[in-house]
Image (cartoon, rainbow, N blue to C red):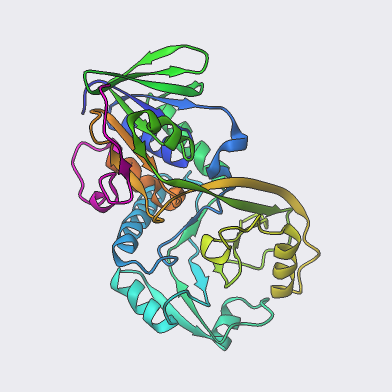
Amino acid sequence: MTTGHTLVVGAGIVGVAITRQLAANGHVVTCIDSADASTQTSLGSLAWINVSSTSDPDYARLRSKSLRAWHNLANDHPSLPATFPGTLIWGTQNKGHEAHADFLRDLGLEVSLLGQSEFKNSVADFASPPEVALYVKGEGAGNPASLVKWFRDAAISQGAVFQKGHVATMLTEAGRIAGVVLSDGKKLTTDRVIVAAGLGSADLLKPFNVDLSVRASPGVLIQTKLTKRVALPIFASPSLDFWQDASGRFMIASSLAKTAKDAADLAVETAIDEIQRMFPGLPQLEVEQVVRRSRHIPRDGYPLIGAVPGIAGLSVAVTHSGVTLAPLIGEFFGGDTVSSDWSRYDLNRDMIVQQERGAF
């Protein structure tokens, strides 16, 4: 167990996963929660826990390890609000279906190649099955708000403290982190700070001449009202990603690969119409909730995880794939052993622009 106190800045899925793991390992930890749900990116996530959305070998291995961590959590904690029905994916980017299947199998995933008839047998209500699709066993999803709450509650049960507030600036002393100042002027002293504040992370690190190069990308999560349950796995179609929870609600989103960078947003009506075309036997779908968020995307698309060079005790955790990677990020920051899993994704890589440092 590491002695001292840790502050986690940000109470989205990554922040609460880090907080839970720290508390579970006996650390004294406080999570600063801005209490502004309207800006919490996690709540606008499809919360698709997957490996199949990437064809980068190293990144896929990382995601595969985190998927196993999710399964371990589910086995150890039956209350975890996640389900793992697998993913049906077709129209894969960059690779043919057979090549992508082999790629995923090499990572230890169980993958089936489905023709039209096999697809129809798997999803009887689907109107026009693709000529070929992949079924990736074991991938999962969960309601994002429920997942955040579960990690938060679990952290509190282990002794973590959540404090409402907004971090205005960070304090340093003799080259190491010393605390933070909240927007109301309150100072909190600490031995370690982990910044997991999404887009806000970049602003907090600017005074240290660190450019996180994180851009905002519009995103939307559409949740329907209860309806007939027809979609048992998760669906990754060429235009939409979606799944249906046990009660019958559809959760619908469009991934970055399927949305132009300058797109204003995914049109709700378009998404609903497409689901209705896929499942013509459904009653007319009604929208229960639309959550719009700006997604934080590092410039090269990969996570930014690790220590901030030059400031002892200061670290950052920023990634677009927060839900998939959350438990593994938690283990990295909350564990007492050093892991090399994240060495490619630290802040020393070329995409990070560090200017000449002054004295802090």
Relative vertical location of residue 4 with respect to residue 347 in this rendering, above or below: above
Q: Who is closer to the viewer here, 144 or 340?
A: 340
Quarter of the image for residue 21 reads top left
Q: Main secondary structure of the magenta part?
A: loop
Horizontal arrangement in the rendering, residue 23 relative to residue 33 (left or right): left
Q: Quadrant of the C terminus?
A: top left
Farthest residue, direction front: 356
Q: Residue 101 location in percent, x, y?
A: 39, 78
Q: Residue 176 location in percent, x, y?
A: 24, 23
Horizontal arrangement in the rendering, residue 105 relative to residue 37 (left or right): left
Q: Quadrant of the N terminus?
A: top left
Residue ID at (43%, 37%): 202
Residue ID at (74%, 49%): 288
Q: Is residue 159 visible?
A: yes
Quarter of the image for residue 120 reads bottom right
Horizontal arrangement in the rendering, residue 234 relative to residue 226 (left or right): left
Horizontal arrangement in the rendering, residue 284 relative to residue 46 (left or right): right
Looking at the rendered structure, the number of numbered marks drawn on it comes to 0
Q: Is residue 233 visible?
A: no
Tell whether position 85 is magenta: no
Q: Residue 150 location in percent, x, y?
A: 49, 38
Farthest residue, direction right: 284
Tell whether position 345 is magenta: yes
Relative vertical location of residue 220 with respect to residue 132 in this rendering, above or below: above
Quarter of the image for residue 313 reads top left
The part of the chain drawn in magenta is 333-360
Residue ID at (26%, 30%): 357
